Amino acid sequence: MDLKELPANVRDDKISEETKSLISSLPSSLPSHADSQGMKLCKYQGCWYYPNTLQGVINFQRGFQPQDTDIILASFPKSGTTWLKALTVALFERSNNHSSSDDQHHPLLSDNPHGIVPFLETDMFHESSSPDLAKFSSFPRLFSTHMPFHTLHETLKGSPCKIVYMCRDVKDTLISWWFFRSAIQKIEPDRSMLESLFKSFCNGTMYYGPFWEHVLSYWRGSLEDPKHVLFMRYEKMKAKPYDQIKRLADFLGCPFTKEEEENGSVDGILEFCSLRNLSSLEVNQTRKKKTMDHKNYFRKGEVGDWKNYLTPEMENKIDMIIQERLQGSGLKF
Ligand code: PAP
């Protein structure tokens, strides 16, 4: 496909001379350091990035000035980021009295969650280390990232801002990647792409990989500093959404009142942010974020969809790798 059609973070046309020189010193370029489709990746602070994304990470590390009240929503790609963003936006919109989908001014009716909560490295700091953050007049500032914890954390310089991490089952994440990749390339998902993604997933050489390093970084971060790092699981959100959104609201310092619980406000937010509702909104059906159709962020949202696509051999291999890598951490899949 024409590289210009790819999302900007996947391309390599925004690199400063300094970053080019850094990249040349990093593990990169070799055929084994490309992703499943032969796109060049480079490893920085233990994580694989496309060169444009790495530029964004470096810009972020140089230029981000945290505020104590900032909230950063973090995830490995395809782990439920869109859902987490929508829920967080809806939680804070209660204070603006935008509590239901009947309210025409609710921001989720006029923009996709990714438009409201931008990614630090691929939106805000993608082209500059001093982006104009004036549009964040809203309070608190909500940002997102797919960077691992250590890369994010060192830039926060001890700021007490809060980080929420959404973790999803490894095999469902892989399948979601496969469908997403196919959708943005406008091709039918085929087995050969799944097999090469699977290979990249298992050897860790994939965008923002290795997966296990990513989840472990936030898992440890949450154990060390539970007041500032919340570790959430997609499957728990699906199984017990009421309890989990209350947990999220408590952590973010905007707990539900008794009255809100009684008047159905919790259920209202869950329903508003459900995949069924969000994906049916006009803004998500027809509009784009840069080159990306909003509708690509929504698919099935099921737990265990991997069972429809992975062979028993693939399942066993992933289970073995994850078990080995997470051993002793207390984190289980
Ligand atoms: P991103 O990394 O590109 O931001 P992300 O939102 O993390 O993607 O993950 C997309 C997955 O979340 C999709 O899963 P699937 O492919 O297995 O279906 C998508 O369907 C799911 N998703 C999106 N919105 C919601 C939602 N409101 N509730 C539950 N799951 C959702």
Image (cartoon, helix red, strand yellow):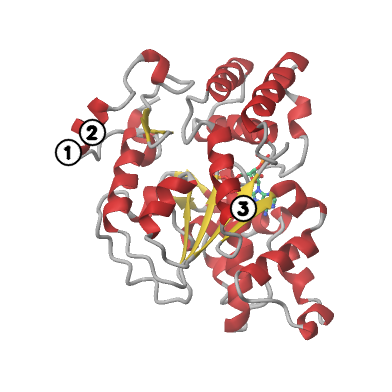
- Residue 243 shows up from this direction: yes
Residue receiving disc 2:
22
Q: Quadrant of the C terminus?
A: top right
The residue that appears at 84% across and 81% down in the rendered structure is 262
User: Measured along the vertical axis of the image, is residue 14 above or below residue 92?
Assistant: above
Q: Percent position (x, y) of residue 211? A: 56, 34
| Label 1 neighbour load within 10 Å: few <14, some 14-19, many 20+ | few
User: Which badge, 3 or 2, comes first in the chain's sequence?
Assistant: 2
Amino acid type, mark 2: Leu
Horizontal side, residue 32 vs residue 77: left or right: left
Residues at badges 3 and 2 in contact (C-beta under 8 Å)? Answer: no
Please, what is the three-letter code of the amino acid marked with disc 3? Leu
Q: Residues within 10 Å of mark 3 (few under 14, many from 20)?
A: few
| SS under mark 2 | helix
Q: Secondary structure at mark 1?
A: helix
CA–CA distance in space, label 3 to label 2: 33 Å
Q: Is mark 1 within 8 Å of ligand 1?
A: no
Residue 154 placement (x, y as % from top left): 38, 52
Q: Quadrant of residue 315?
A: top right
Q: Are marks 1 and 2 in contact (CB under 8 Å)?
A: yes
The residue singled out by tag 3 in the image is 223
Where is residue 159 shown, x and y percent of the image? 42, 66
**Is the residue 28 above or below the residue 252 in the image?**
above
Question: How far apart are labels 1 and 3 at the CA level?
Answer: 36 Å
**Circle 1 is placed at which residue position?**
18
Ligand 1 neighbours mark 3 (CB distance < 8 Å):
no
Q: Amino acid at mark 1?
A: Glu
